[in-house]
Image (tube, helix red, strand yellow):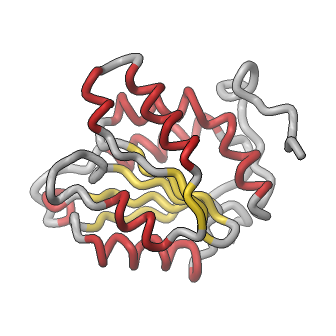
């Protein structure tokens, strides 16, 4: 078992029933594979748009599987079935509002409807939870624009050190914790 375990949760009624091929979860795994140079493993699952089931998945990945990072994809829009932010808030120890703001700011550079997104960044224990949209290109845009802050955040929460590739280093890399 790797010290760096990352949970990926696709939230989709259709994908959970096999009616739709999930593209968001695999897009996250592929992107992380190019961005993280440390040895890591993914724990991937698909759940329906059900707040309780999302909460169970997030809690299990952090409390039992010891994931230092959990990325959700889907369920962040304004429709009645979009309950990923509510599930995240319910299991969180603290909300990190700047991360949600950053994700929306990045997306707004590409599409005006990003203003409808309710993405949340939060922590539970020593783990970080980020709600990403379901669109693979939007996932890549957001991760490219903000992932440089993620390893630093995980370290500040008491999680493992995550090394990143040159794809991430540069302007986005934090010089270290600010105290």
The image quarter containing residue 37 is top right
Number of numbered discs overlaid on the protein picture:
0
The image quarter containing residue 117 is top left
> Looking at the picture, does residue 101 appear above or below residue 88?
above
- Residue at 74% from the left image edge and 61% from the top image edge: 157
Q: Which one is nearer the viewer's eye here, 55 or 35?
A: 55
- Residue at 55% from the left image edge and 58% from the top image edge: 95
Q: Which percent across, then down, holds residue 26?
A: 39, 47
Q: Residue furthest right?
A: 179
- Residue at 25% from the left image edge and 45% from the top image edge: 77
Q: Residue furthest bottom?
A: 64
Q: Describe residue 56's horizontal placement relative to residue 48 as left or right.
A: right
Q: Quadrant of the N terminus?
A: bottom right
Q: Residue furthest left?
A: 19
Q: Which one is nearer the viewer's eye here, 96 or 32?
A: 96
Q: Which percent across, then down, holds residue 61?
A: 52, 73
Q: Which percent across, then down, holds residue 168?
A: 67, 28
> Looking at the picture, does residue 18 appear above or below residue 174?
below
Q: Which percent across, then down, holds residue 111?
A: 30, 20
Q: Which one is nearer the viewer's eye here, 159 or 39?
A: 159
- Residue at 42% from the left image edge and 33% from the top image edge: 104
Q: Describe residue 96's horizontal placement relative to residue 104 as left or right.
A: right
């Amino acid at each position: 078992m790797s010290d760096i375990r990352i949970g990926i949760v696709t939230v989709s009624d259709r994908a959970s029933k096999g009616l739709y091929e999930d593209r968001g979860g695999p897009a996250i795994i592929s992107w992380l594979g190019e961005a993280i140079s440390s040895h890591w493993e993914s724990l991937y699952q698909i759940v329906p748009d059900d707040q309780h089931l999302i909460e169970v998945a997030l809690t299990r990945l952090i409390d039992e599987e010891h994931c230092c990072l959990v990325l959700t994809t889907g369920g962040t829009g304004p429709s009645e079935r979009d309950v990923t932010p509510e599930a995240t808030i319910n299991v969180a120890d603290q909300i990190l509002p700047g991360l949600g703001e950053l994700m929306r700011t990045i997306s707004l550079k590409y599409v005006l409807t990003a203003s409808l997104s309710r993405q949340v960044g939060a922590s539970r224990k020593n783990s970080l939870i980020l709600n990403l949209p379901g669109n693979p290109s939007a996932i890549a845009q957001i991760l490219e624009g903000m992932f440089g802050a993620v390893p630093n955040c995980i370290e500040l929460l008491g999680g493992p050190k995550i090394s990143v590739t040159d794809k991430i280093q540069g302007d986005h890399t934090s010089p270290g914790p600010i105290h």
